[in-house]
Image (cartoon, rainbow, N blue to C red):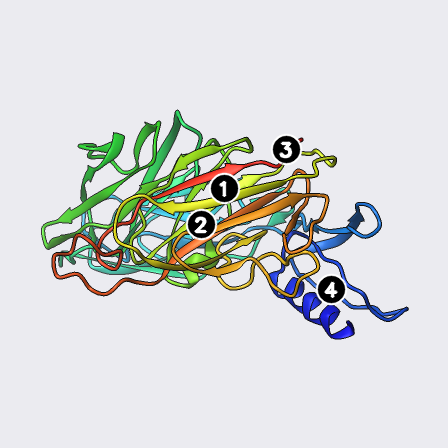
């Protein structure tokens, strides 16, 4: 039984979950150390036999650390706009440039605009300040000014306020290119920003949408993709773990309710579907709930992922009560039953008023399809999610 306890503890530690529970029989006086750099402390709650250990997130007390983003080349006589990207967020900015005028050094906003009249390379830097004071000056960002036009490249689109958003939210889509000579023209396609020609493109989104923006200058063009997911306003989540795996996170939020059904975005070979839901505050429910996702179009496709307290967790998952197993899966249509607060053997125990995620990726793509239409490796496989809460909750 001592071995069982250690195995379960290691699963919990590997998950780095914000909230989790387990049970074990172990020797009297046994102890363990739990370390999570995202937590300032842990709180213990729940009845004896079903204790819940909850992470108390660290509240940042650091000044912002910033980098400059934008094009690394620009045409003489044109206006170039650069943007400060800071973490944690800054409330004011101080820009500098090492030569050729004061276009950026006079700016105190998140962006600055500069223009040059002769061939030169100008280095730009920014310092962000928040309630904790000014942060360090950003690394130097050199921009080559000349009459040589360079095709846009390294372009990507960011969303504000981020994914997912509540239906009816105004979203700003901004494209930045790491290289290419400004000025650029912009042509947006897809959803409510179709046919817009500005950067950023701003529109109200009532449903999940995706498309492209074509960034063009006289040397050529680049067409990065964009996507916006809607799901009841679950708020922004950290999907950097998906990005690190080369996956495009598509986040939807499923409301806590009986037989709540949501059609998920399509899933291509490089997509990760993150299904977010938050439990109720009830502690008296004794039944089981279920979260499931089923493919309603496309071929039979093997998938991997986990029911987890962390987004983009595709390998660990929540521990099951009185079991060495976790909620990691590798099959086509994942479905997990769970309990809320009150544990049942072989089911994960969810904490009240806590956010969880069913993370899914096409980990094992189907065999190549020469038509390009019946394969998640080259096409899309829509998923439908159903959440049924435990009775009494």
Q: In this view, does 181 lie to the left or right of 39?
A: left
Residue 375 visible in the current orientation? yes
Lower position in the chain sequence, tag 3 or tag 4: 4
- Which residue is denoted by mark 3 in the rendering? 391
Q: Pointers 4 and 1 in contact (CB under 8 A)?
A: no
Residue 236 circle label: 1
Q: What element carries label 2?
A: strand
- Residue 30, given in percent of the width and then of the height, sits at 85, 70
Q: Is residue 222 above or below residue 110?
A: below
Between tags 3 and 4, which lies in front? 3
Q: Is residue 205 above or below residue 385?
A: above
- Residue 212, given in percent of the width and then of the height, sits at 22, 44
Between tags 4 and 2, which lies in front? 4
- Which residue is denoted by mark 2 in the rendering? 85
What is the spatial separation of the Cα atoms under label 3 and label 1, in whole angstroms? 29 Å
- Residue 354, given in percent of the width and then of the height, sits at 64, 42
Lower position in the chain sequence, tag 4 or tag 2: 4
Residue 34 circle label: 4
Q: Quadrant of the C terminus?
A: top right
Between tags 2 and 1, which lies in front? 1
């Amino acid at each position: 039984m001592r071995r069982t306890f250690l195995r379960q503890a290691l699963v919990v530690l590997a998950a780095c979950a914000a909230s989790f529970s387990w049970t074990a029989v172990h020797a009297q006086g046994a102890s363990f150390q739990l370390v999570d750099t995202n937590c300032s402390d842990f709180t213990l709650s729940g009845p004896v036999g079903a204790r819940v250990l909850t992470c108390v997130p660290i509240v940042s007390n650091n000044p912002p650390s910033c980098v400059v983003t934008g094009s690394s080349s620009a045409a003489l006589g044109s206006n170039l706009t650069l943007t400060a990207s800071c973490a944690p967020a800054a409330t004011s900015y101080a820009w500098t440039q090492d030569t050729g005028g004061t276009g950026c050094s006079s700016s105190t906003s998140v962006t600055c605009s500069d223009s040059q009249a002769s061939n030169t390379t100008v280095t730009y830097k920014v310092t962000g300040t928040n309630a904790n004071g000014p942060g360090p000056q950003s690394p130097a960002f050199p921009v080559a000014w000349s009459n040589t036009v360079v095709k846009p490249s390294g372009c990507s689109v960011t969303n504000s306020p981020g994914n997912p958003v509540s239906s009816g939210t105004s979203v700003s889509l901004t494209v930045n290119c790491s290289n290419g000579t400004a000025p650029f023209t912009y042509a947006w396609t897809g959803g409510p920003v179709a046919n817009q020609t500005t950067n950023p493109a701003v529109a109200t989104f009532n449903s999940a949408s995706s498309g492209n923006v074509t960034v063009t200058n006289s040397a050529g063009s680049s067409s990065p993709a964009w996507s916006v997911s809607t799901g009841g306003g679950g708020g922004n989540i950290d999907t950097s773990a998906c990005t690190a795996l080369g996956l495009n996170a598509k986040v939807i939020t499923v409301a806590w309710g009986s037989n709540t059904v949501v059609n998920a975005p399509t899933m291509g070979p490089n997509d990760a579907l993150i299904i977010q839901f938050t439990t109720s505050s009830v502690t008296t429910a004794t039944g089981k709930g279920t979260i499931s996702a089923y493919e309603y179009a496309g071929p039979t496709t093997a998938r991997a992922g986990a029911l987890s307290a962390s987004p983009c967790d595709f390998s660990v998952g929540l521990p099951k009560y009185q079991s060495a197993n976790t909620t990691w899966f590798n099959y086509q249509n994942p479905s997990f039953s769970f309990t809320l607060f009150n544990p049942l053997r072989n089911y994960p125990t969810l904490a009240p008023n806590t956010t969880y995620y069913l993370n899914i990726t096409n980990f094992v793509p189907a065999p190549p399809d020469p038509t390009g239409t019946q394969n998640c490796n080259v096409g899309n496989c829509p998923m439908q999610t159903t959440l049924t809460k435990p009775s009494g909750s």
